[in-house]
Image (tube, rainbow, N blue to C red):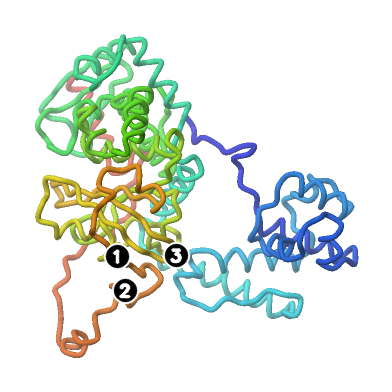
Amino acid sequence: MRAPELTGDDAALDLIALGRRVRHLRKKQGMTLDDLGEAVGTAPSQLSLLENGRREPKLSQLHQLARVLGVSTEDLLGAEPPSKRAALEIELEKTQRGPLYAALGLPTVRISNRLPMDVLESLVALQREVARRLEEQAATPEEARRANTELREEMRARNNYYPEIEAQAAELLESVGYSSGPLGHHIAARIAEHLGFSIRFVPNLPNSTRSVTDRKNRIIYLTQGRSRDWDARSVLLQALGHHVLGHTEPRDYSEFLSQRVYTNYFAAALLMPERTAVEHLTEAKGAKQLAIEDLRDAFAVSYESAAHRFTNLATEHLGITCHFQKVHESGIIHKAYENDGVSFPTDHTGAIEGQTVCRRWTSREVFEVEDKFRSFNQYTDTPAGTYWCTARTEGHSSGMYSLSIGVPFEHAKWFRGKDTQARSSSGCPDDPSCCRTPPPELAELWAGAAWPATRANTHLLAAMPQGAFPGVDTTEVYQFLQRHS
C-alpha cells in the first residue's frame, strides 16, 4: 500500500500563492481593494486577508474573483506565480511562516510594493543560504526527522483516520468469524491461517528484529520472552499487515516509516475493530465518561495502543480533535500527534520528536504524581488555548514514559476526570522564561558554578543505518531463514 494521497476537497490550497496571484491580477486591472470588494460583494478587509494568504476563499468566491479579474478559475489556482517578484514574495512569505524562521527568532519583514526588488532578492537568497547551512550542520538522522514530519502532516490532514485500512481489517475479521470483544491469540492465529501463513516460535530471532517472515514458504517467525514491551498478537498482525497492504521492499526511509505506521494501524484496527470500538466510545461519550483506560480494558490491549486508537477514531466518529504524546521521564518527546491546534516544540525542520516538552504540561506533571494506579487529569492554559489532558506512566525497558491524550477545553465535558482541580499554565514553546530559563534567584546562586556530567545520547550522533530495513542485518536474517528452512 502506497502512501494515501490527498485529492479533491482534501487537497489544501496554496493560500499564499493564490493571494499573490489575486493581488497581481487586481493591480493589473487598475483596481483598488475597494473596487474589487464592490465587484464581488466582499469587504475589502476580507480581500486583504485573502491577498496576504490568511483567509481561504469559498468556491463561489473563487468563481466571482476569476470572472471579475478576467481569468478562468483554473488560471487563478495555477501553480506558476504571475511574475518573478511575485515568486520571490511567495517564497519569502512561506519562509517567514515556517518553523525554521520561528526557530531563529527573527523579526518578520513586511512584504509590500515599497520593498525594493534588490532587497527582496537579497532576503530570499539569505534565507536559502541559512537553510542550506543548517542542512549541512544538521544531525545525521535528518532524513528520518524530515520523513517523520511529512508523515505526521499526512496523518493530521486525514485526522489520523485511514478508511481503506479499516475496510481491509473489517473484511478480514468477518472472514474468520470475529464478532466482538478482545481479539484472542487463537483468532490472531486463525487470521494468519486464513491468509495462508503458519506461525513458528523460536528462541533465536536476529537481535535487530521482532519478527521475520519467510515469504517463500509463508512462515512467520516470532519469539517468546525477549521483551515485555511487545504484545505477540500485535507483532504477528503487523507482520501480516505488510502482506495484506501489498508492501514491497521500501525504496527509502520515508517509505519504510510509512509502511511501519500503516501496519501498526492495521494491527490496531484488528485488535480494536472500528465498529465495536466506535460503539464503545459513542456510548461512553453519551454518558460523558470517555476514558482511555476503559478502551484499553475493553479490548485487552496496552494503554499506549488504546491511546493511539483513540486518535484514529475520535475526530472521524466523535467529532473530537485531540493530541497524543509519549514522553520519556527526561522530558524528551518520543511520539506525538495533534489535530487540535496545540503548539508542540519543534526544530527548524518542524520535527517534534526529540524536543523537550514543557515542565508544566500534563505529560511532565504526571511523573510527580504519587497515585500511579489512576490516570492523572489536568487543565493547562497555553498560548494556543486551554487543554484538558489525561495521562499515565508506564515502565519500559528503556525507562519510564508518560502517555497522554489531550483535547481542547470545549471537548473536556465528554471525559471522565473533567472535574479535576489540577490546573497549570504554560508559555511554551514561545516563552523561554516559562521553564527553559532557570529562575533568576537560582541563576544568581549557581550560574557559572554548575558543571553537569551529561548523559550522552549517542544515537543522536549515529548515521542512519543502511539498507531497505534500517538497523537490520540482512545477512543475519538470511542465515536465520536458511537454518530454519
Q: Residue at x 47, y 45 (%)?
A: 156
The amino acid on which the numbered mark 3 sits, given as a three-letter code, is: His
- Taking the view exactly as shown, the residue that stands out farthest to the bottom is 444
The amino acid on which the numbered mark 2 sits, given as a three-letter code, is: Cys
Q: Quadrant of residue 36?
A: bottom right
Q: Badge 2 local density, few (<14 within 10 Å), some, or many (20+)?
A: some
| Residue 188 x %, y % | 25, 18
Kindly check if marks 2 and 1 are in contact, taking CB atoms under 8 A apart as contact: yes
Classify mark 2: helix, strand or loop. Answer: loop
Residue hosting label 1: 358
Between 378 and 147, the one lying in front of the other is: 378
Foreground mark, 1 or 3, reads 1
On residue 434, the disc is 2
Relative height, residue 305 to residue 139 (above, below): above
Of the 4 image quadrants, the one containing the C terminus is top left
| Residue 448 x %, y % | 19, 88
Classify mark 1: helix, strand or loop. Answer: loop
Between 484 and 154, the one lying in front of the other is: 154
| Label 2 or label 3, whichever comes before in sequence order | 3
| Residue 269 x %, y % | 35, 27
Kindly check if marks 2 and 3 are in contact, taking CB atoms under 8 A apart as contact: no
